[in-house]
Image (cartoon, helix red, strand yellow):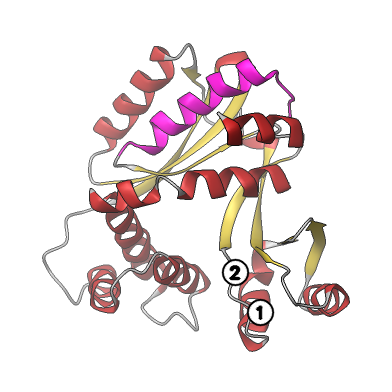
Amino acid sequence: MSGHSHWSTIRRKKGAADAKRGQVFTRLAREITIAARDGGGDPSANLRLGYAIDRARSQNMPKDSIERAIKRGTGELKDAVAIEEMTYEGYAPNAIALMVSCVTDNRNRAVADIRHILNRYGGNLAESGSVAWQFKRISYFAFPLDAHDPDEIFELAVESGADDVLFDNNLVEIIAEVESYKVINDRLKDANIEPQEAELRMTPKNEVELSVEETIQVLKVIEALEELDDVQDVFSNMALTDVIMAELETA
């Protein structure tokens, strides 16, 4: 699992460029709007909205932008276009399974763009259900250990419902069921711990190891998909080992 977190760190290096184009805030606003539309505008009673707001704050999204996105979802603002969410399943080169999460105001554009990227890199879209069974949705937290006591972190996480707590060098990763997200997030805040990552994500049940060259092939596909305006997240079952990460960080 730690490889995925390290890869997220690499991706954050290009986050500033995305933010300049407004992509990050647009995606976050859509996520908040969808959550508020489906579960109401109170983050204390709407787990998904609370998660979306936490994610927006971690990216320094302005408070008024967050509030507008909530009001669009609850119908208090009437200027919102109709948006919908869907998840597309597919394969990258080397038979790597992909789950592509989208929020869009144009379903036809979204699927056409995703199909174009996959075909261009030698992958393909798959039928609904043919890939999803290989993944499980989880709560995921990651932060530096720094001066925190590992035993205290472990106890806090387990008491809050964590399924696993991993310590990798100075990195702590907490993995739990979706239902435990709010409890763990609140307990971390109470302990003055600010996660670098706190999200609901799809994790593969089994990972596939590739060579460095093959891994780079797949990462190019994932990056191209992530650059699409309608794409929120891309998850794969590709293993990112320490050896692979070392190669990527020096590339």
Q: Earlier in the sequence, mark 2 or mark 1?
A: 1
Q: Left or right of 234: which side holds 143?
A: right
Judging depth in this view, the residue of 52 and 153 nearest the camera is 153
Q: Position of residue 82 (x, y in %)?
A: 21, 54
Image location of residue 35, percent across then percent down: 40, 65
Tell me the amino acid under the disc marked 2. Pro
**Displayed quadrant of residue 217:** top right
Q: Residue at x 46, y 65 (%)?
A: 55
Question: Is 37 within the magenta?
Answer: no
Q: Amino acid at mark 1?
A: Leu
Q: Please, what is the dominant secondary structure of the magenta stretch?
A: helix
Furthest toward the front, the residue is: 250
The secondary structure type at the circle numbered 2 is loop
Do the residues bearing badges 2 and 1 touch, measured as CB atoms within 8 Å?
A: yes
Residue identified by numbered label 2: 195
Assign the C terminus to one quadrant of the image: top right
Which quarter of the figure has residue 41? Answer: bottom left
Range of magenta residues:
206-228
What residue is shown with label 1? 188
Q: Residue at (35%, 59%) from the top-left corner?
A: 28
Examine the image and state in which quarter residue 42 appears. Answer: bottom left
Q: Which mark is residue 38?
A: none
Q: Could one spot residue 238 in this view of the protein?
A: no
Q: Callout 1: helix, strand or loop?
A: helix
